[in-house]
Image (tube, rainbow, N blue to C red):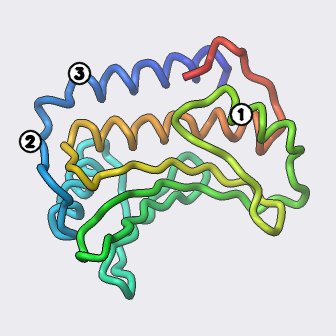
Amino acid sequence: MKAGSVAQVVLAASALAAATGGAVGQTQVGRPTVASMDSAIKAVFAEINTPYQARKDSDGSTTFVFTVGSVTGQLNEFLGDDGKVESLKLNVGYDTDKAPPLTAINSFNEKRRFGKSYLDVDGDPFLVSDLDVQFGINNGALKAWIVRFRAIVPLFEMEVVKGGKTSDLLQE
């Protein structure tokens, strides 16, 4: 995928999510329950035609596993002391033979606002994004967050995993 076309995808995805945000769902006031958060996530995945598998974790939260391009992504729920969802995390990771240079990680983090990268203990690159939902969330904001993350994964692959260059004009 060319750098210019990736920028167009990122802009179009953000515009689509913003344009449909108000029509997709009502604001959830207060910390969402696991059931209401699961329903919202499933509705967004259905709307953006993203197949997923959901599994219940030992603490009662749900992990959603889905494909982003050529890599498997996860959406994890994190629960507060009251058992309700207080934050969400999207992540993708790559099993690489050689760790990307820290300059690539640092450059990506400096240029990108909606995803942060790091190297795990094995030197494998990861891209993550967190979303605080403890005061509520609506389906439009949830959709925008997921769509934006999916759109920056190809940039992460080009700039960090594959060591390529993209234009500084592609900054979010």
Task: Locate residue 165: give its quadrant.
Answer: top right
User: Mark 3 is on which residue type?
Assistant: Ala
Query: To which quarter of the image does residue 1 belong?
Result: top right
Q: Nearer the viewer, mark 2 or mark 3?
A: 2
Q: Percent from the top left, x then y, of residue 41? A: 26, 55
Distance, label 1 to label 2, CA atoms, is: 34 Å
Asked if residue 100 is positioned above or below residue 16 in the image, the reply reads: below
The mark nearer the N terminus, 3 or 1, is: 3
The disc placed on residue 168 is none
Image coordinates for residue 118, horizontal then vertical, percent: 72, 51
Mark number for residue 108? 1
The secondary element bearing badge 1 is classed as helix
Taking 57 as reference, is 140 left or right?
left
Q: Position of residue 85 (x, y in %)?
A: 28, 65
Mark 3 residue element: helix
Asked whether disc 2 touches disc 3, contact meaning CB atoms under 8 Å apart, the reply is no
Give the class, few, some or many, for how many residues have Cα within 10 Å of label 3's Cα (few <14, many ≥20): few
Identity of the amino acid at label 1? Phe
Marks 1 and 2, the one that precedes in the sequence: 2
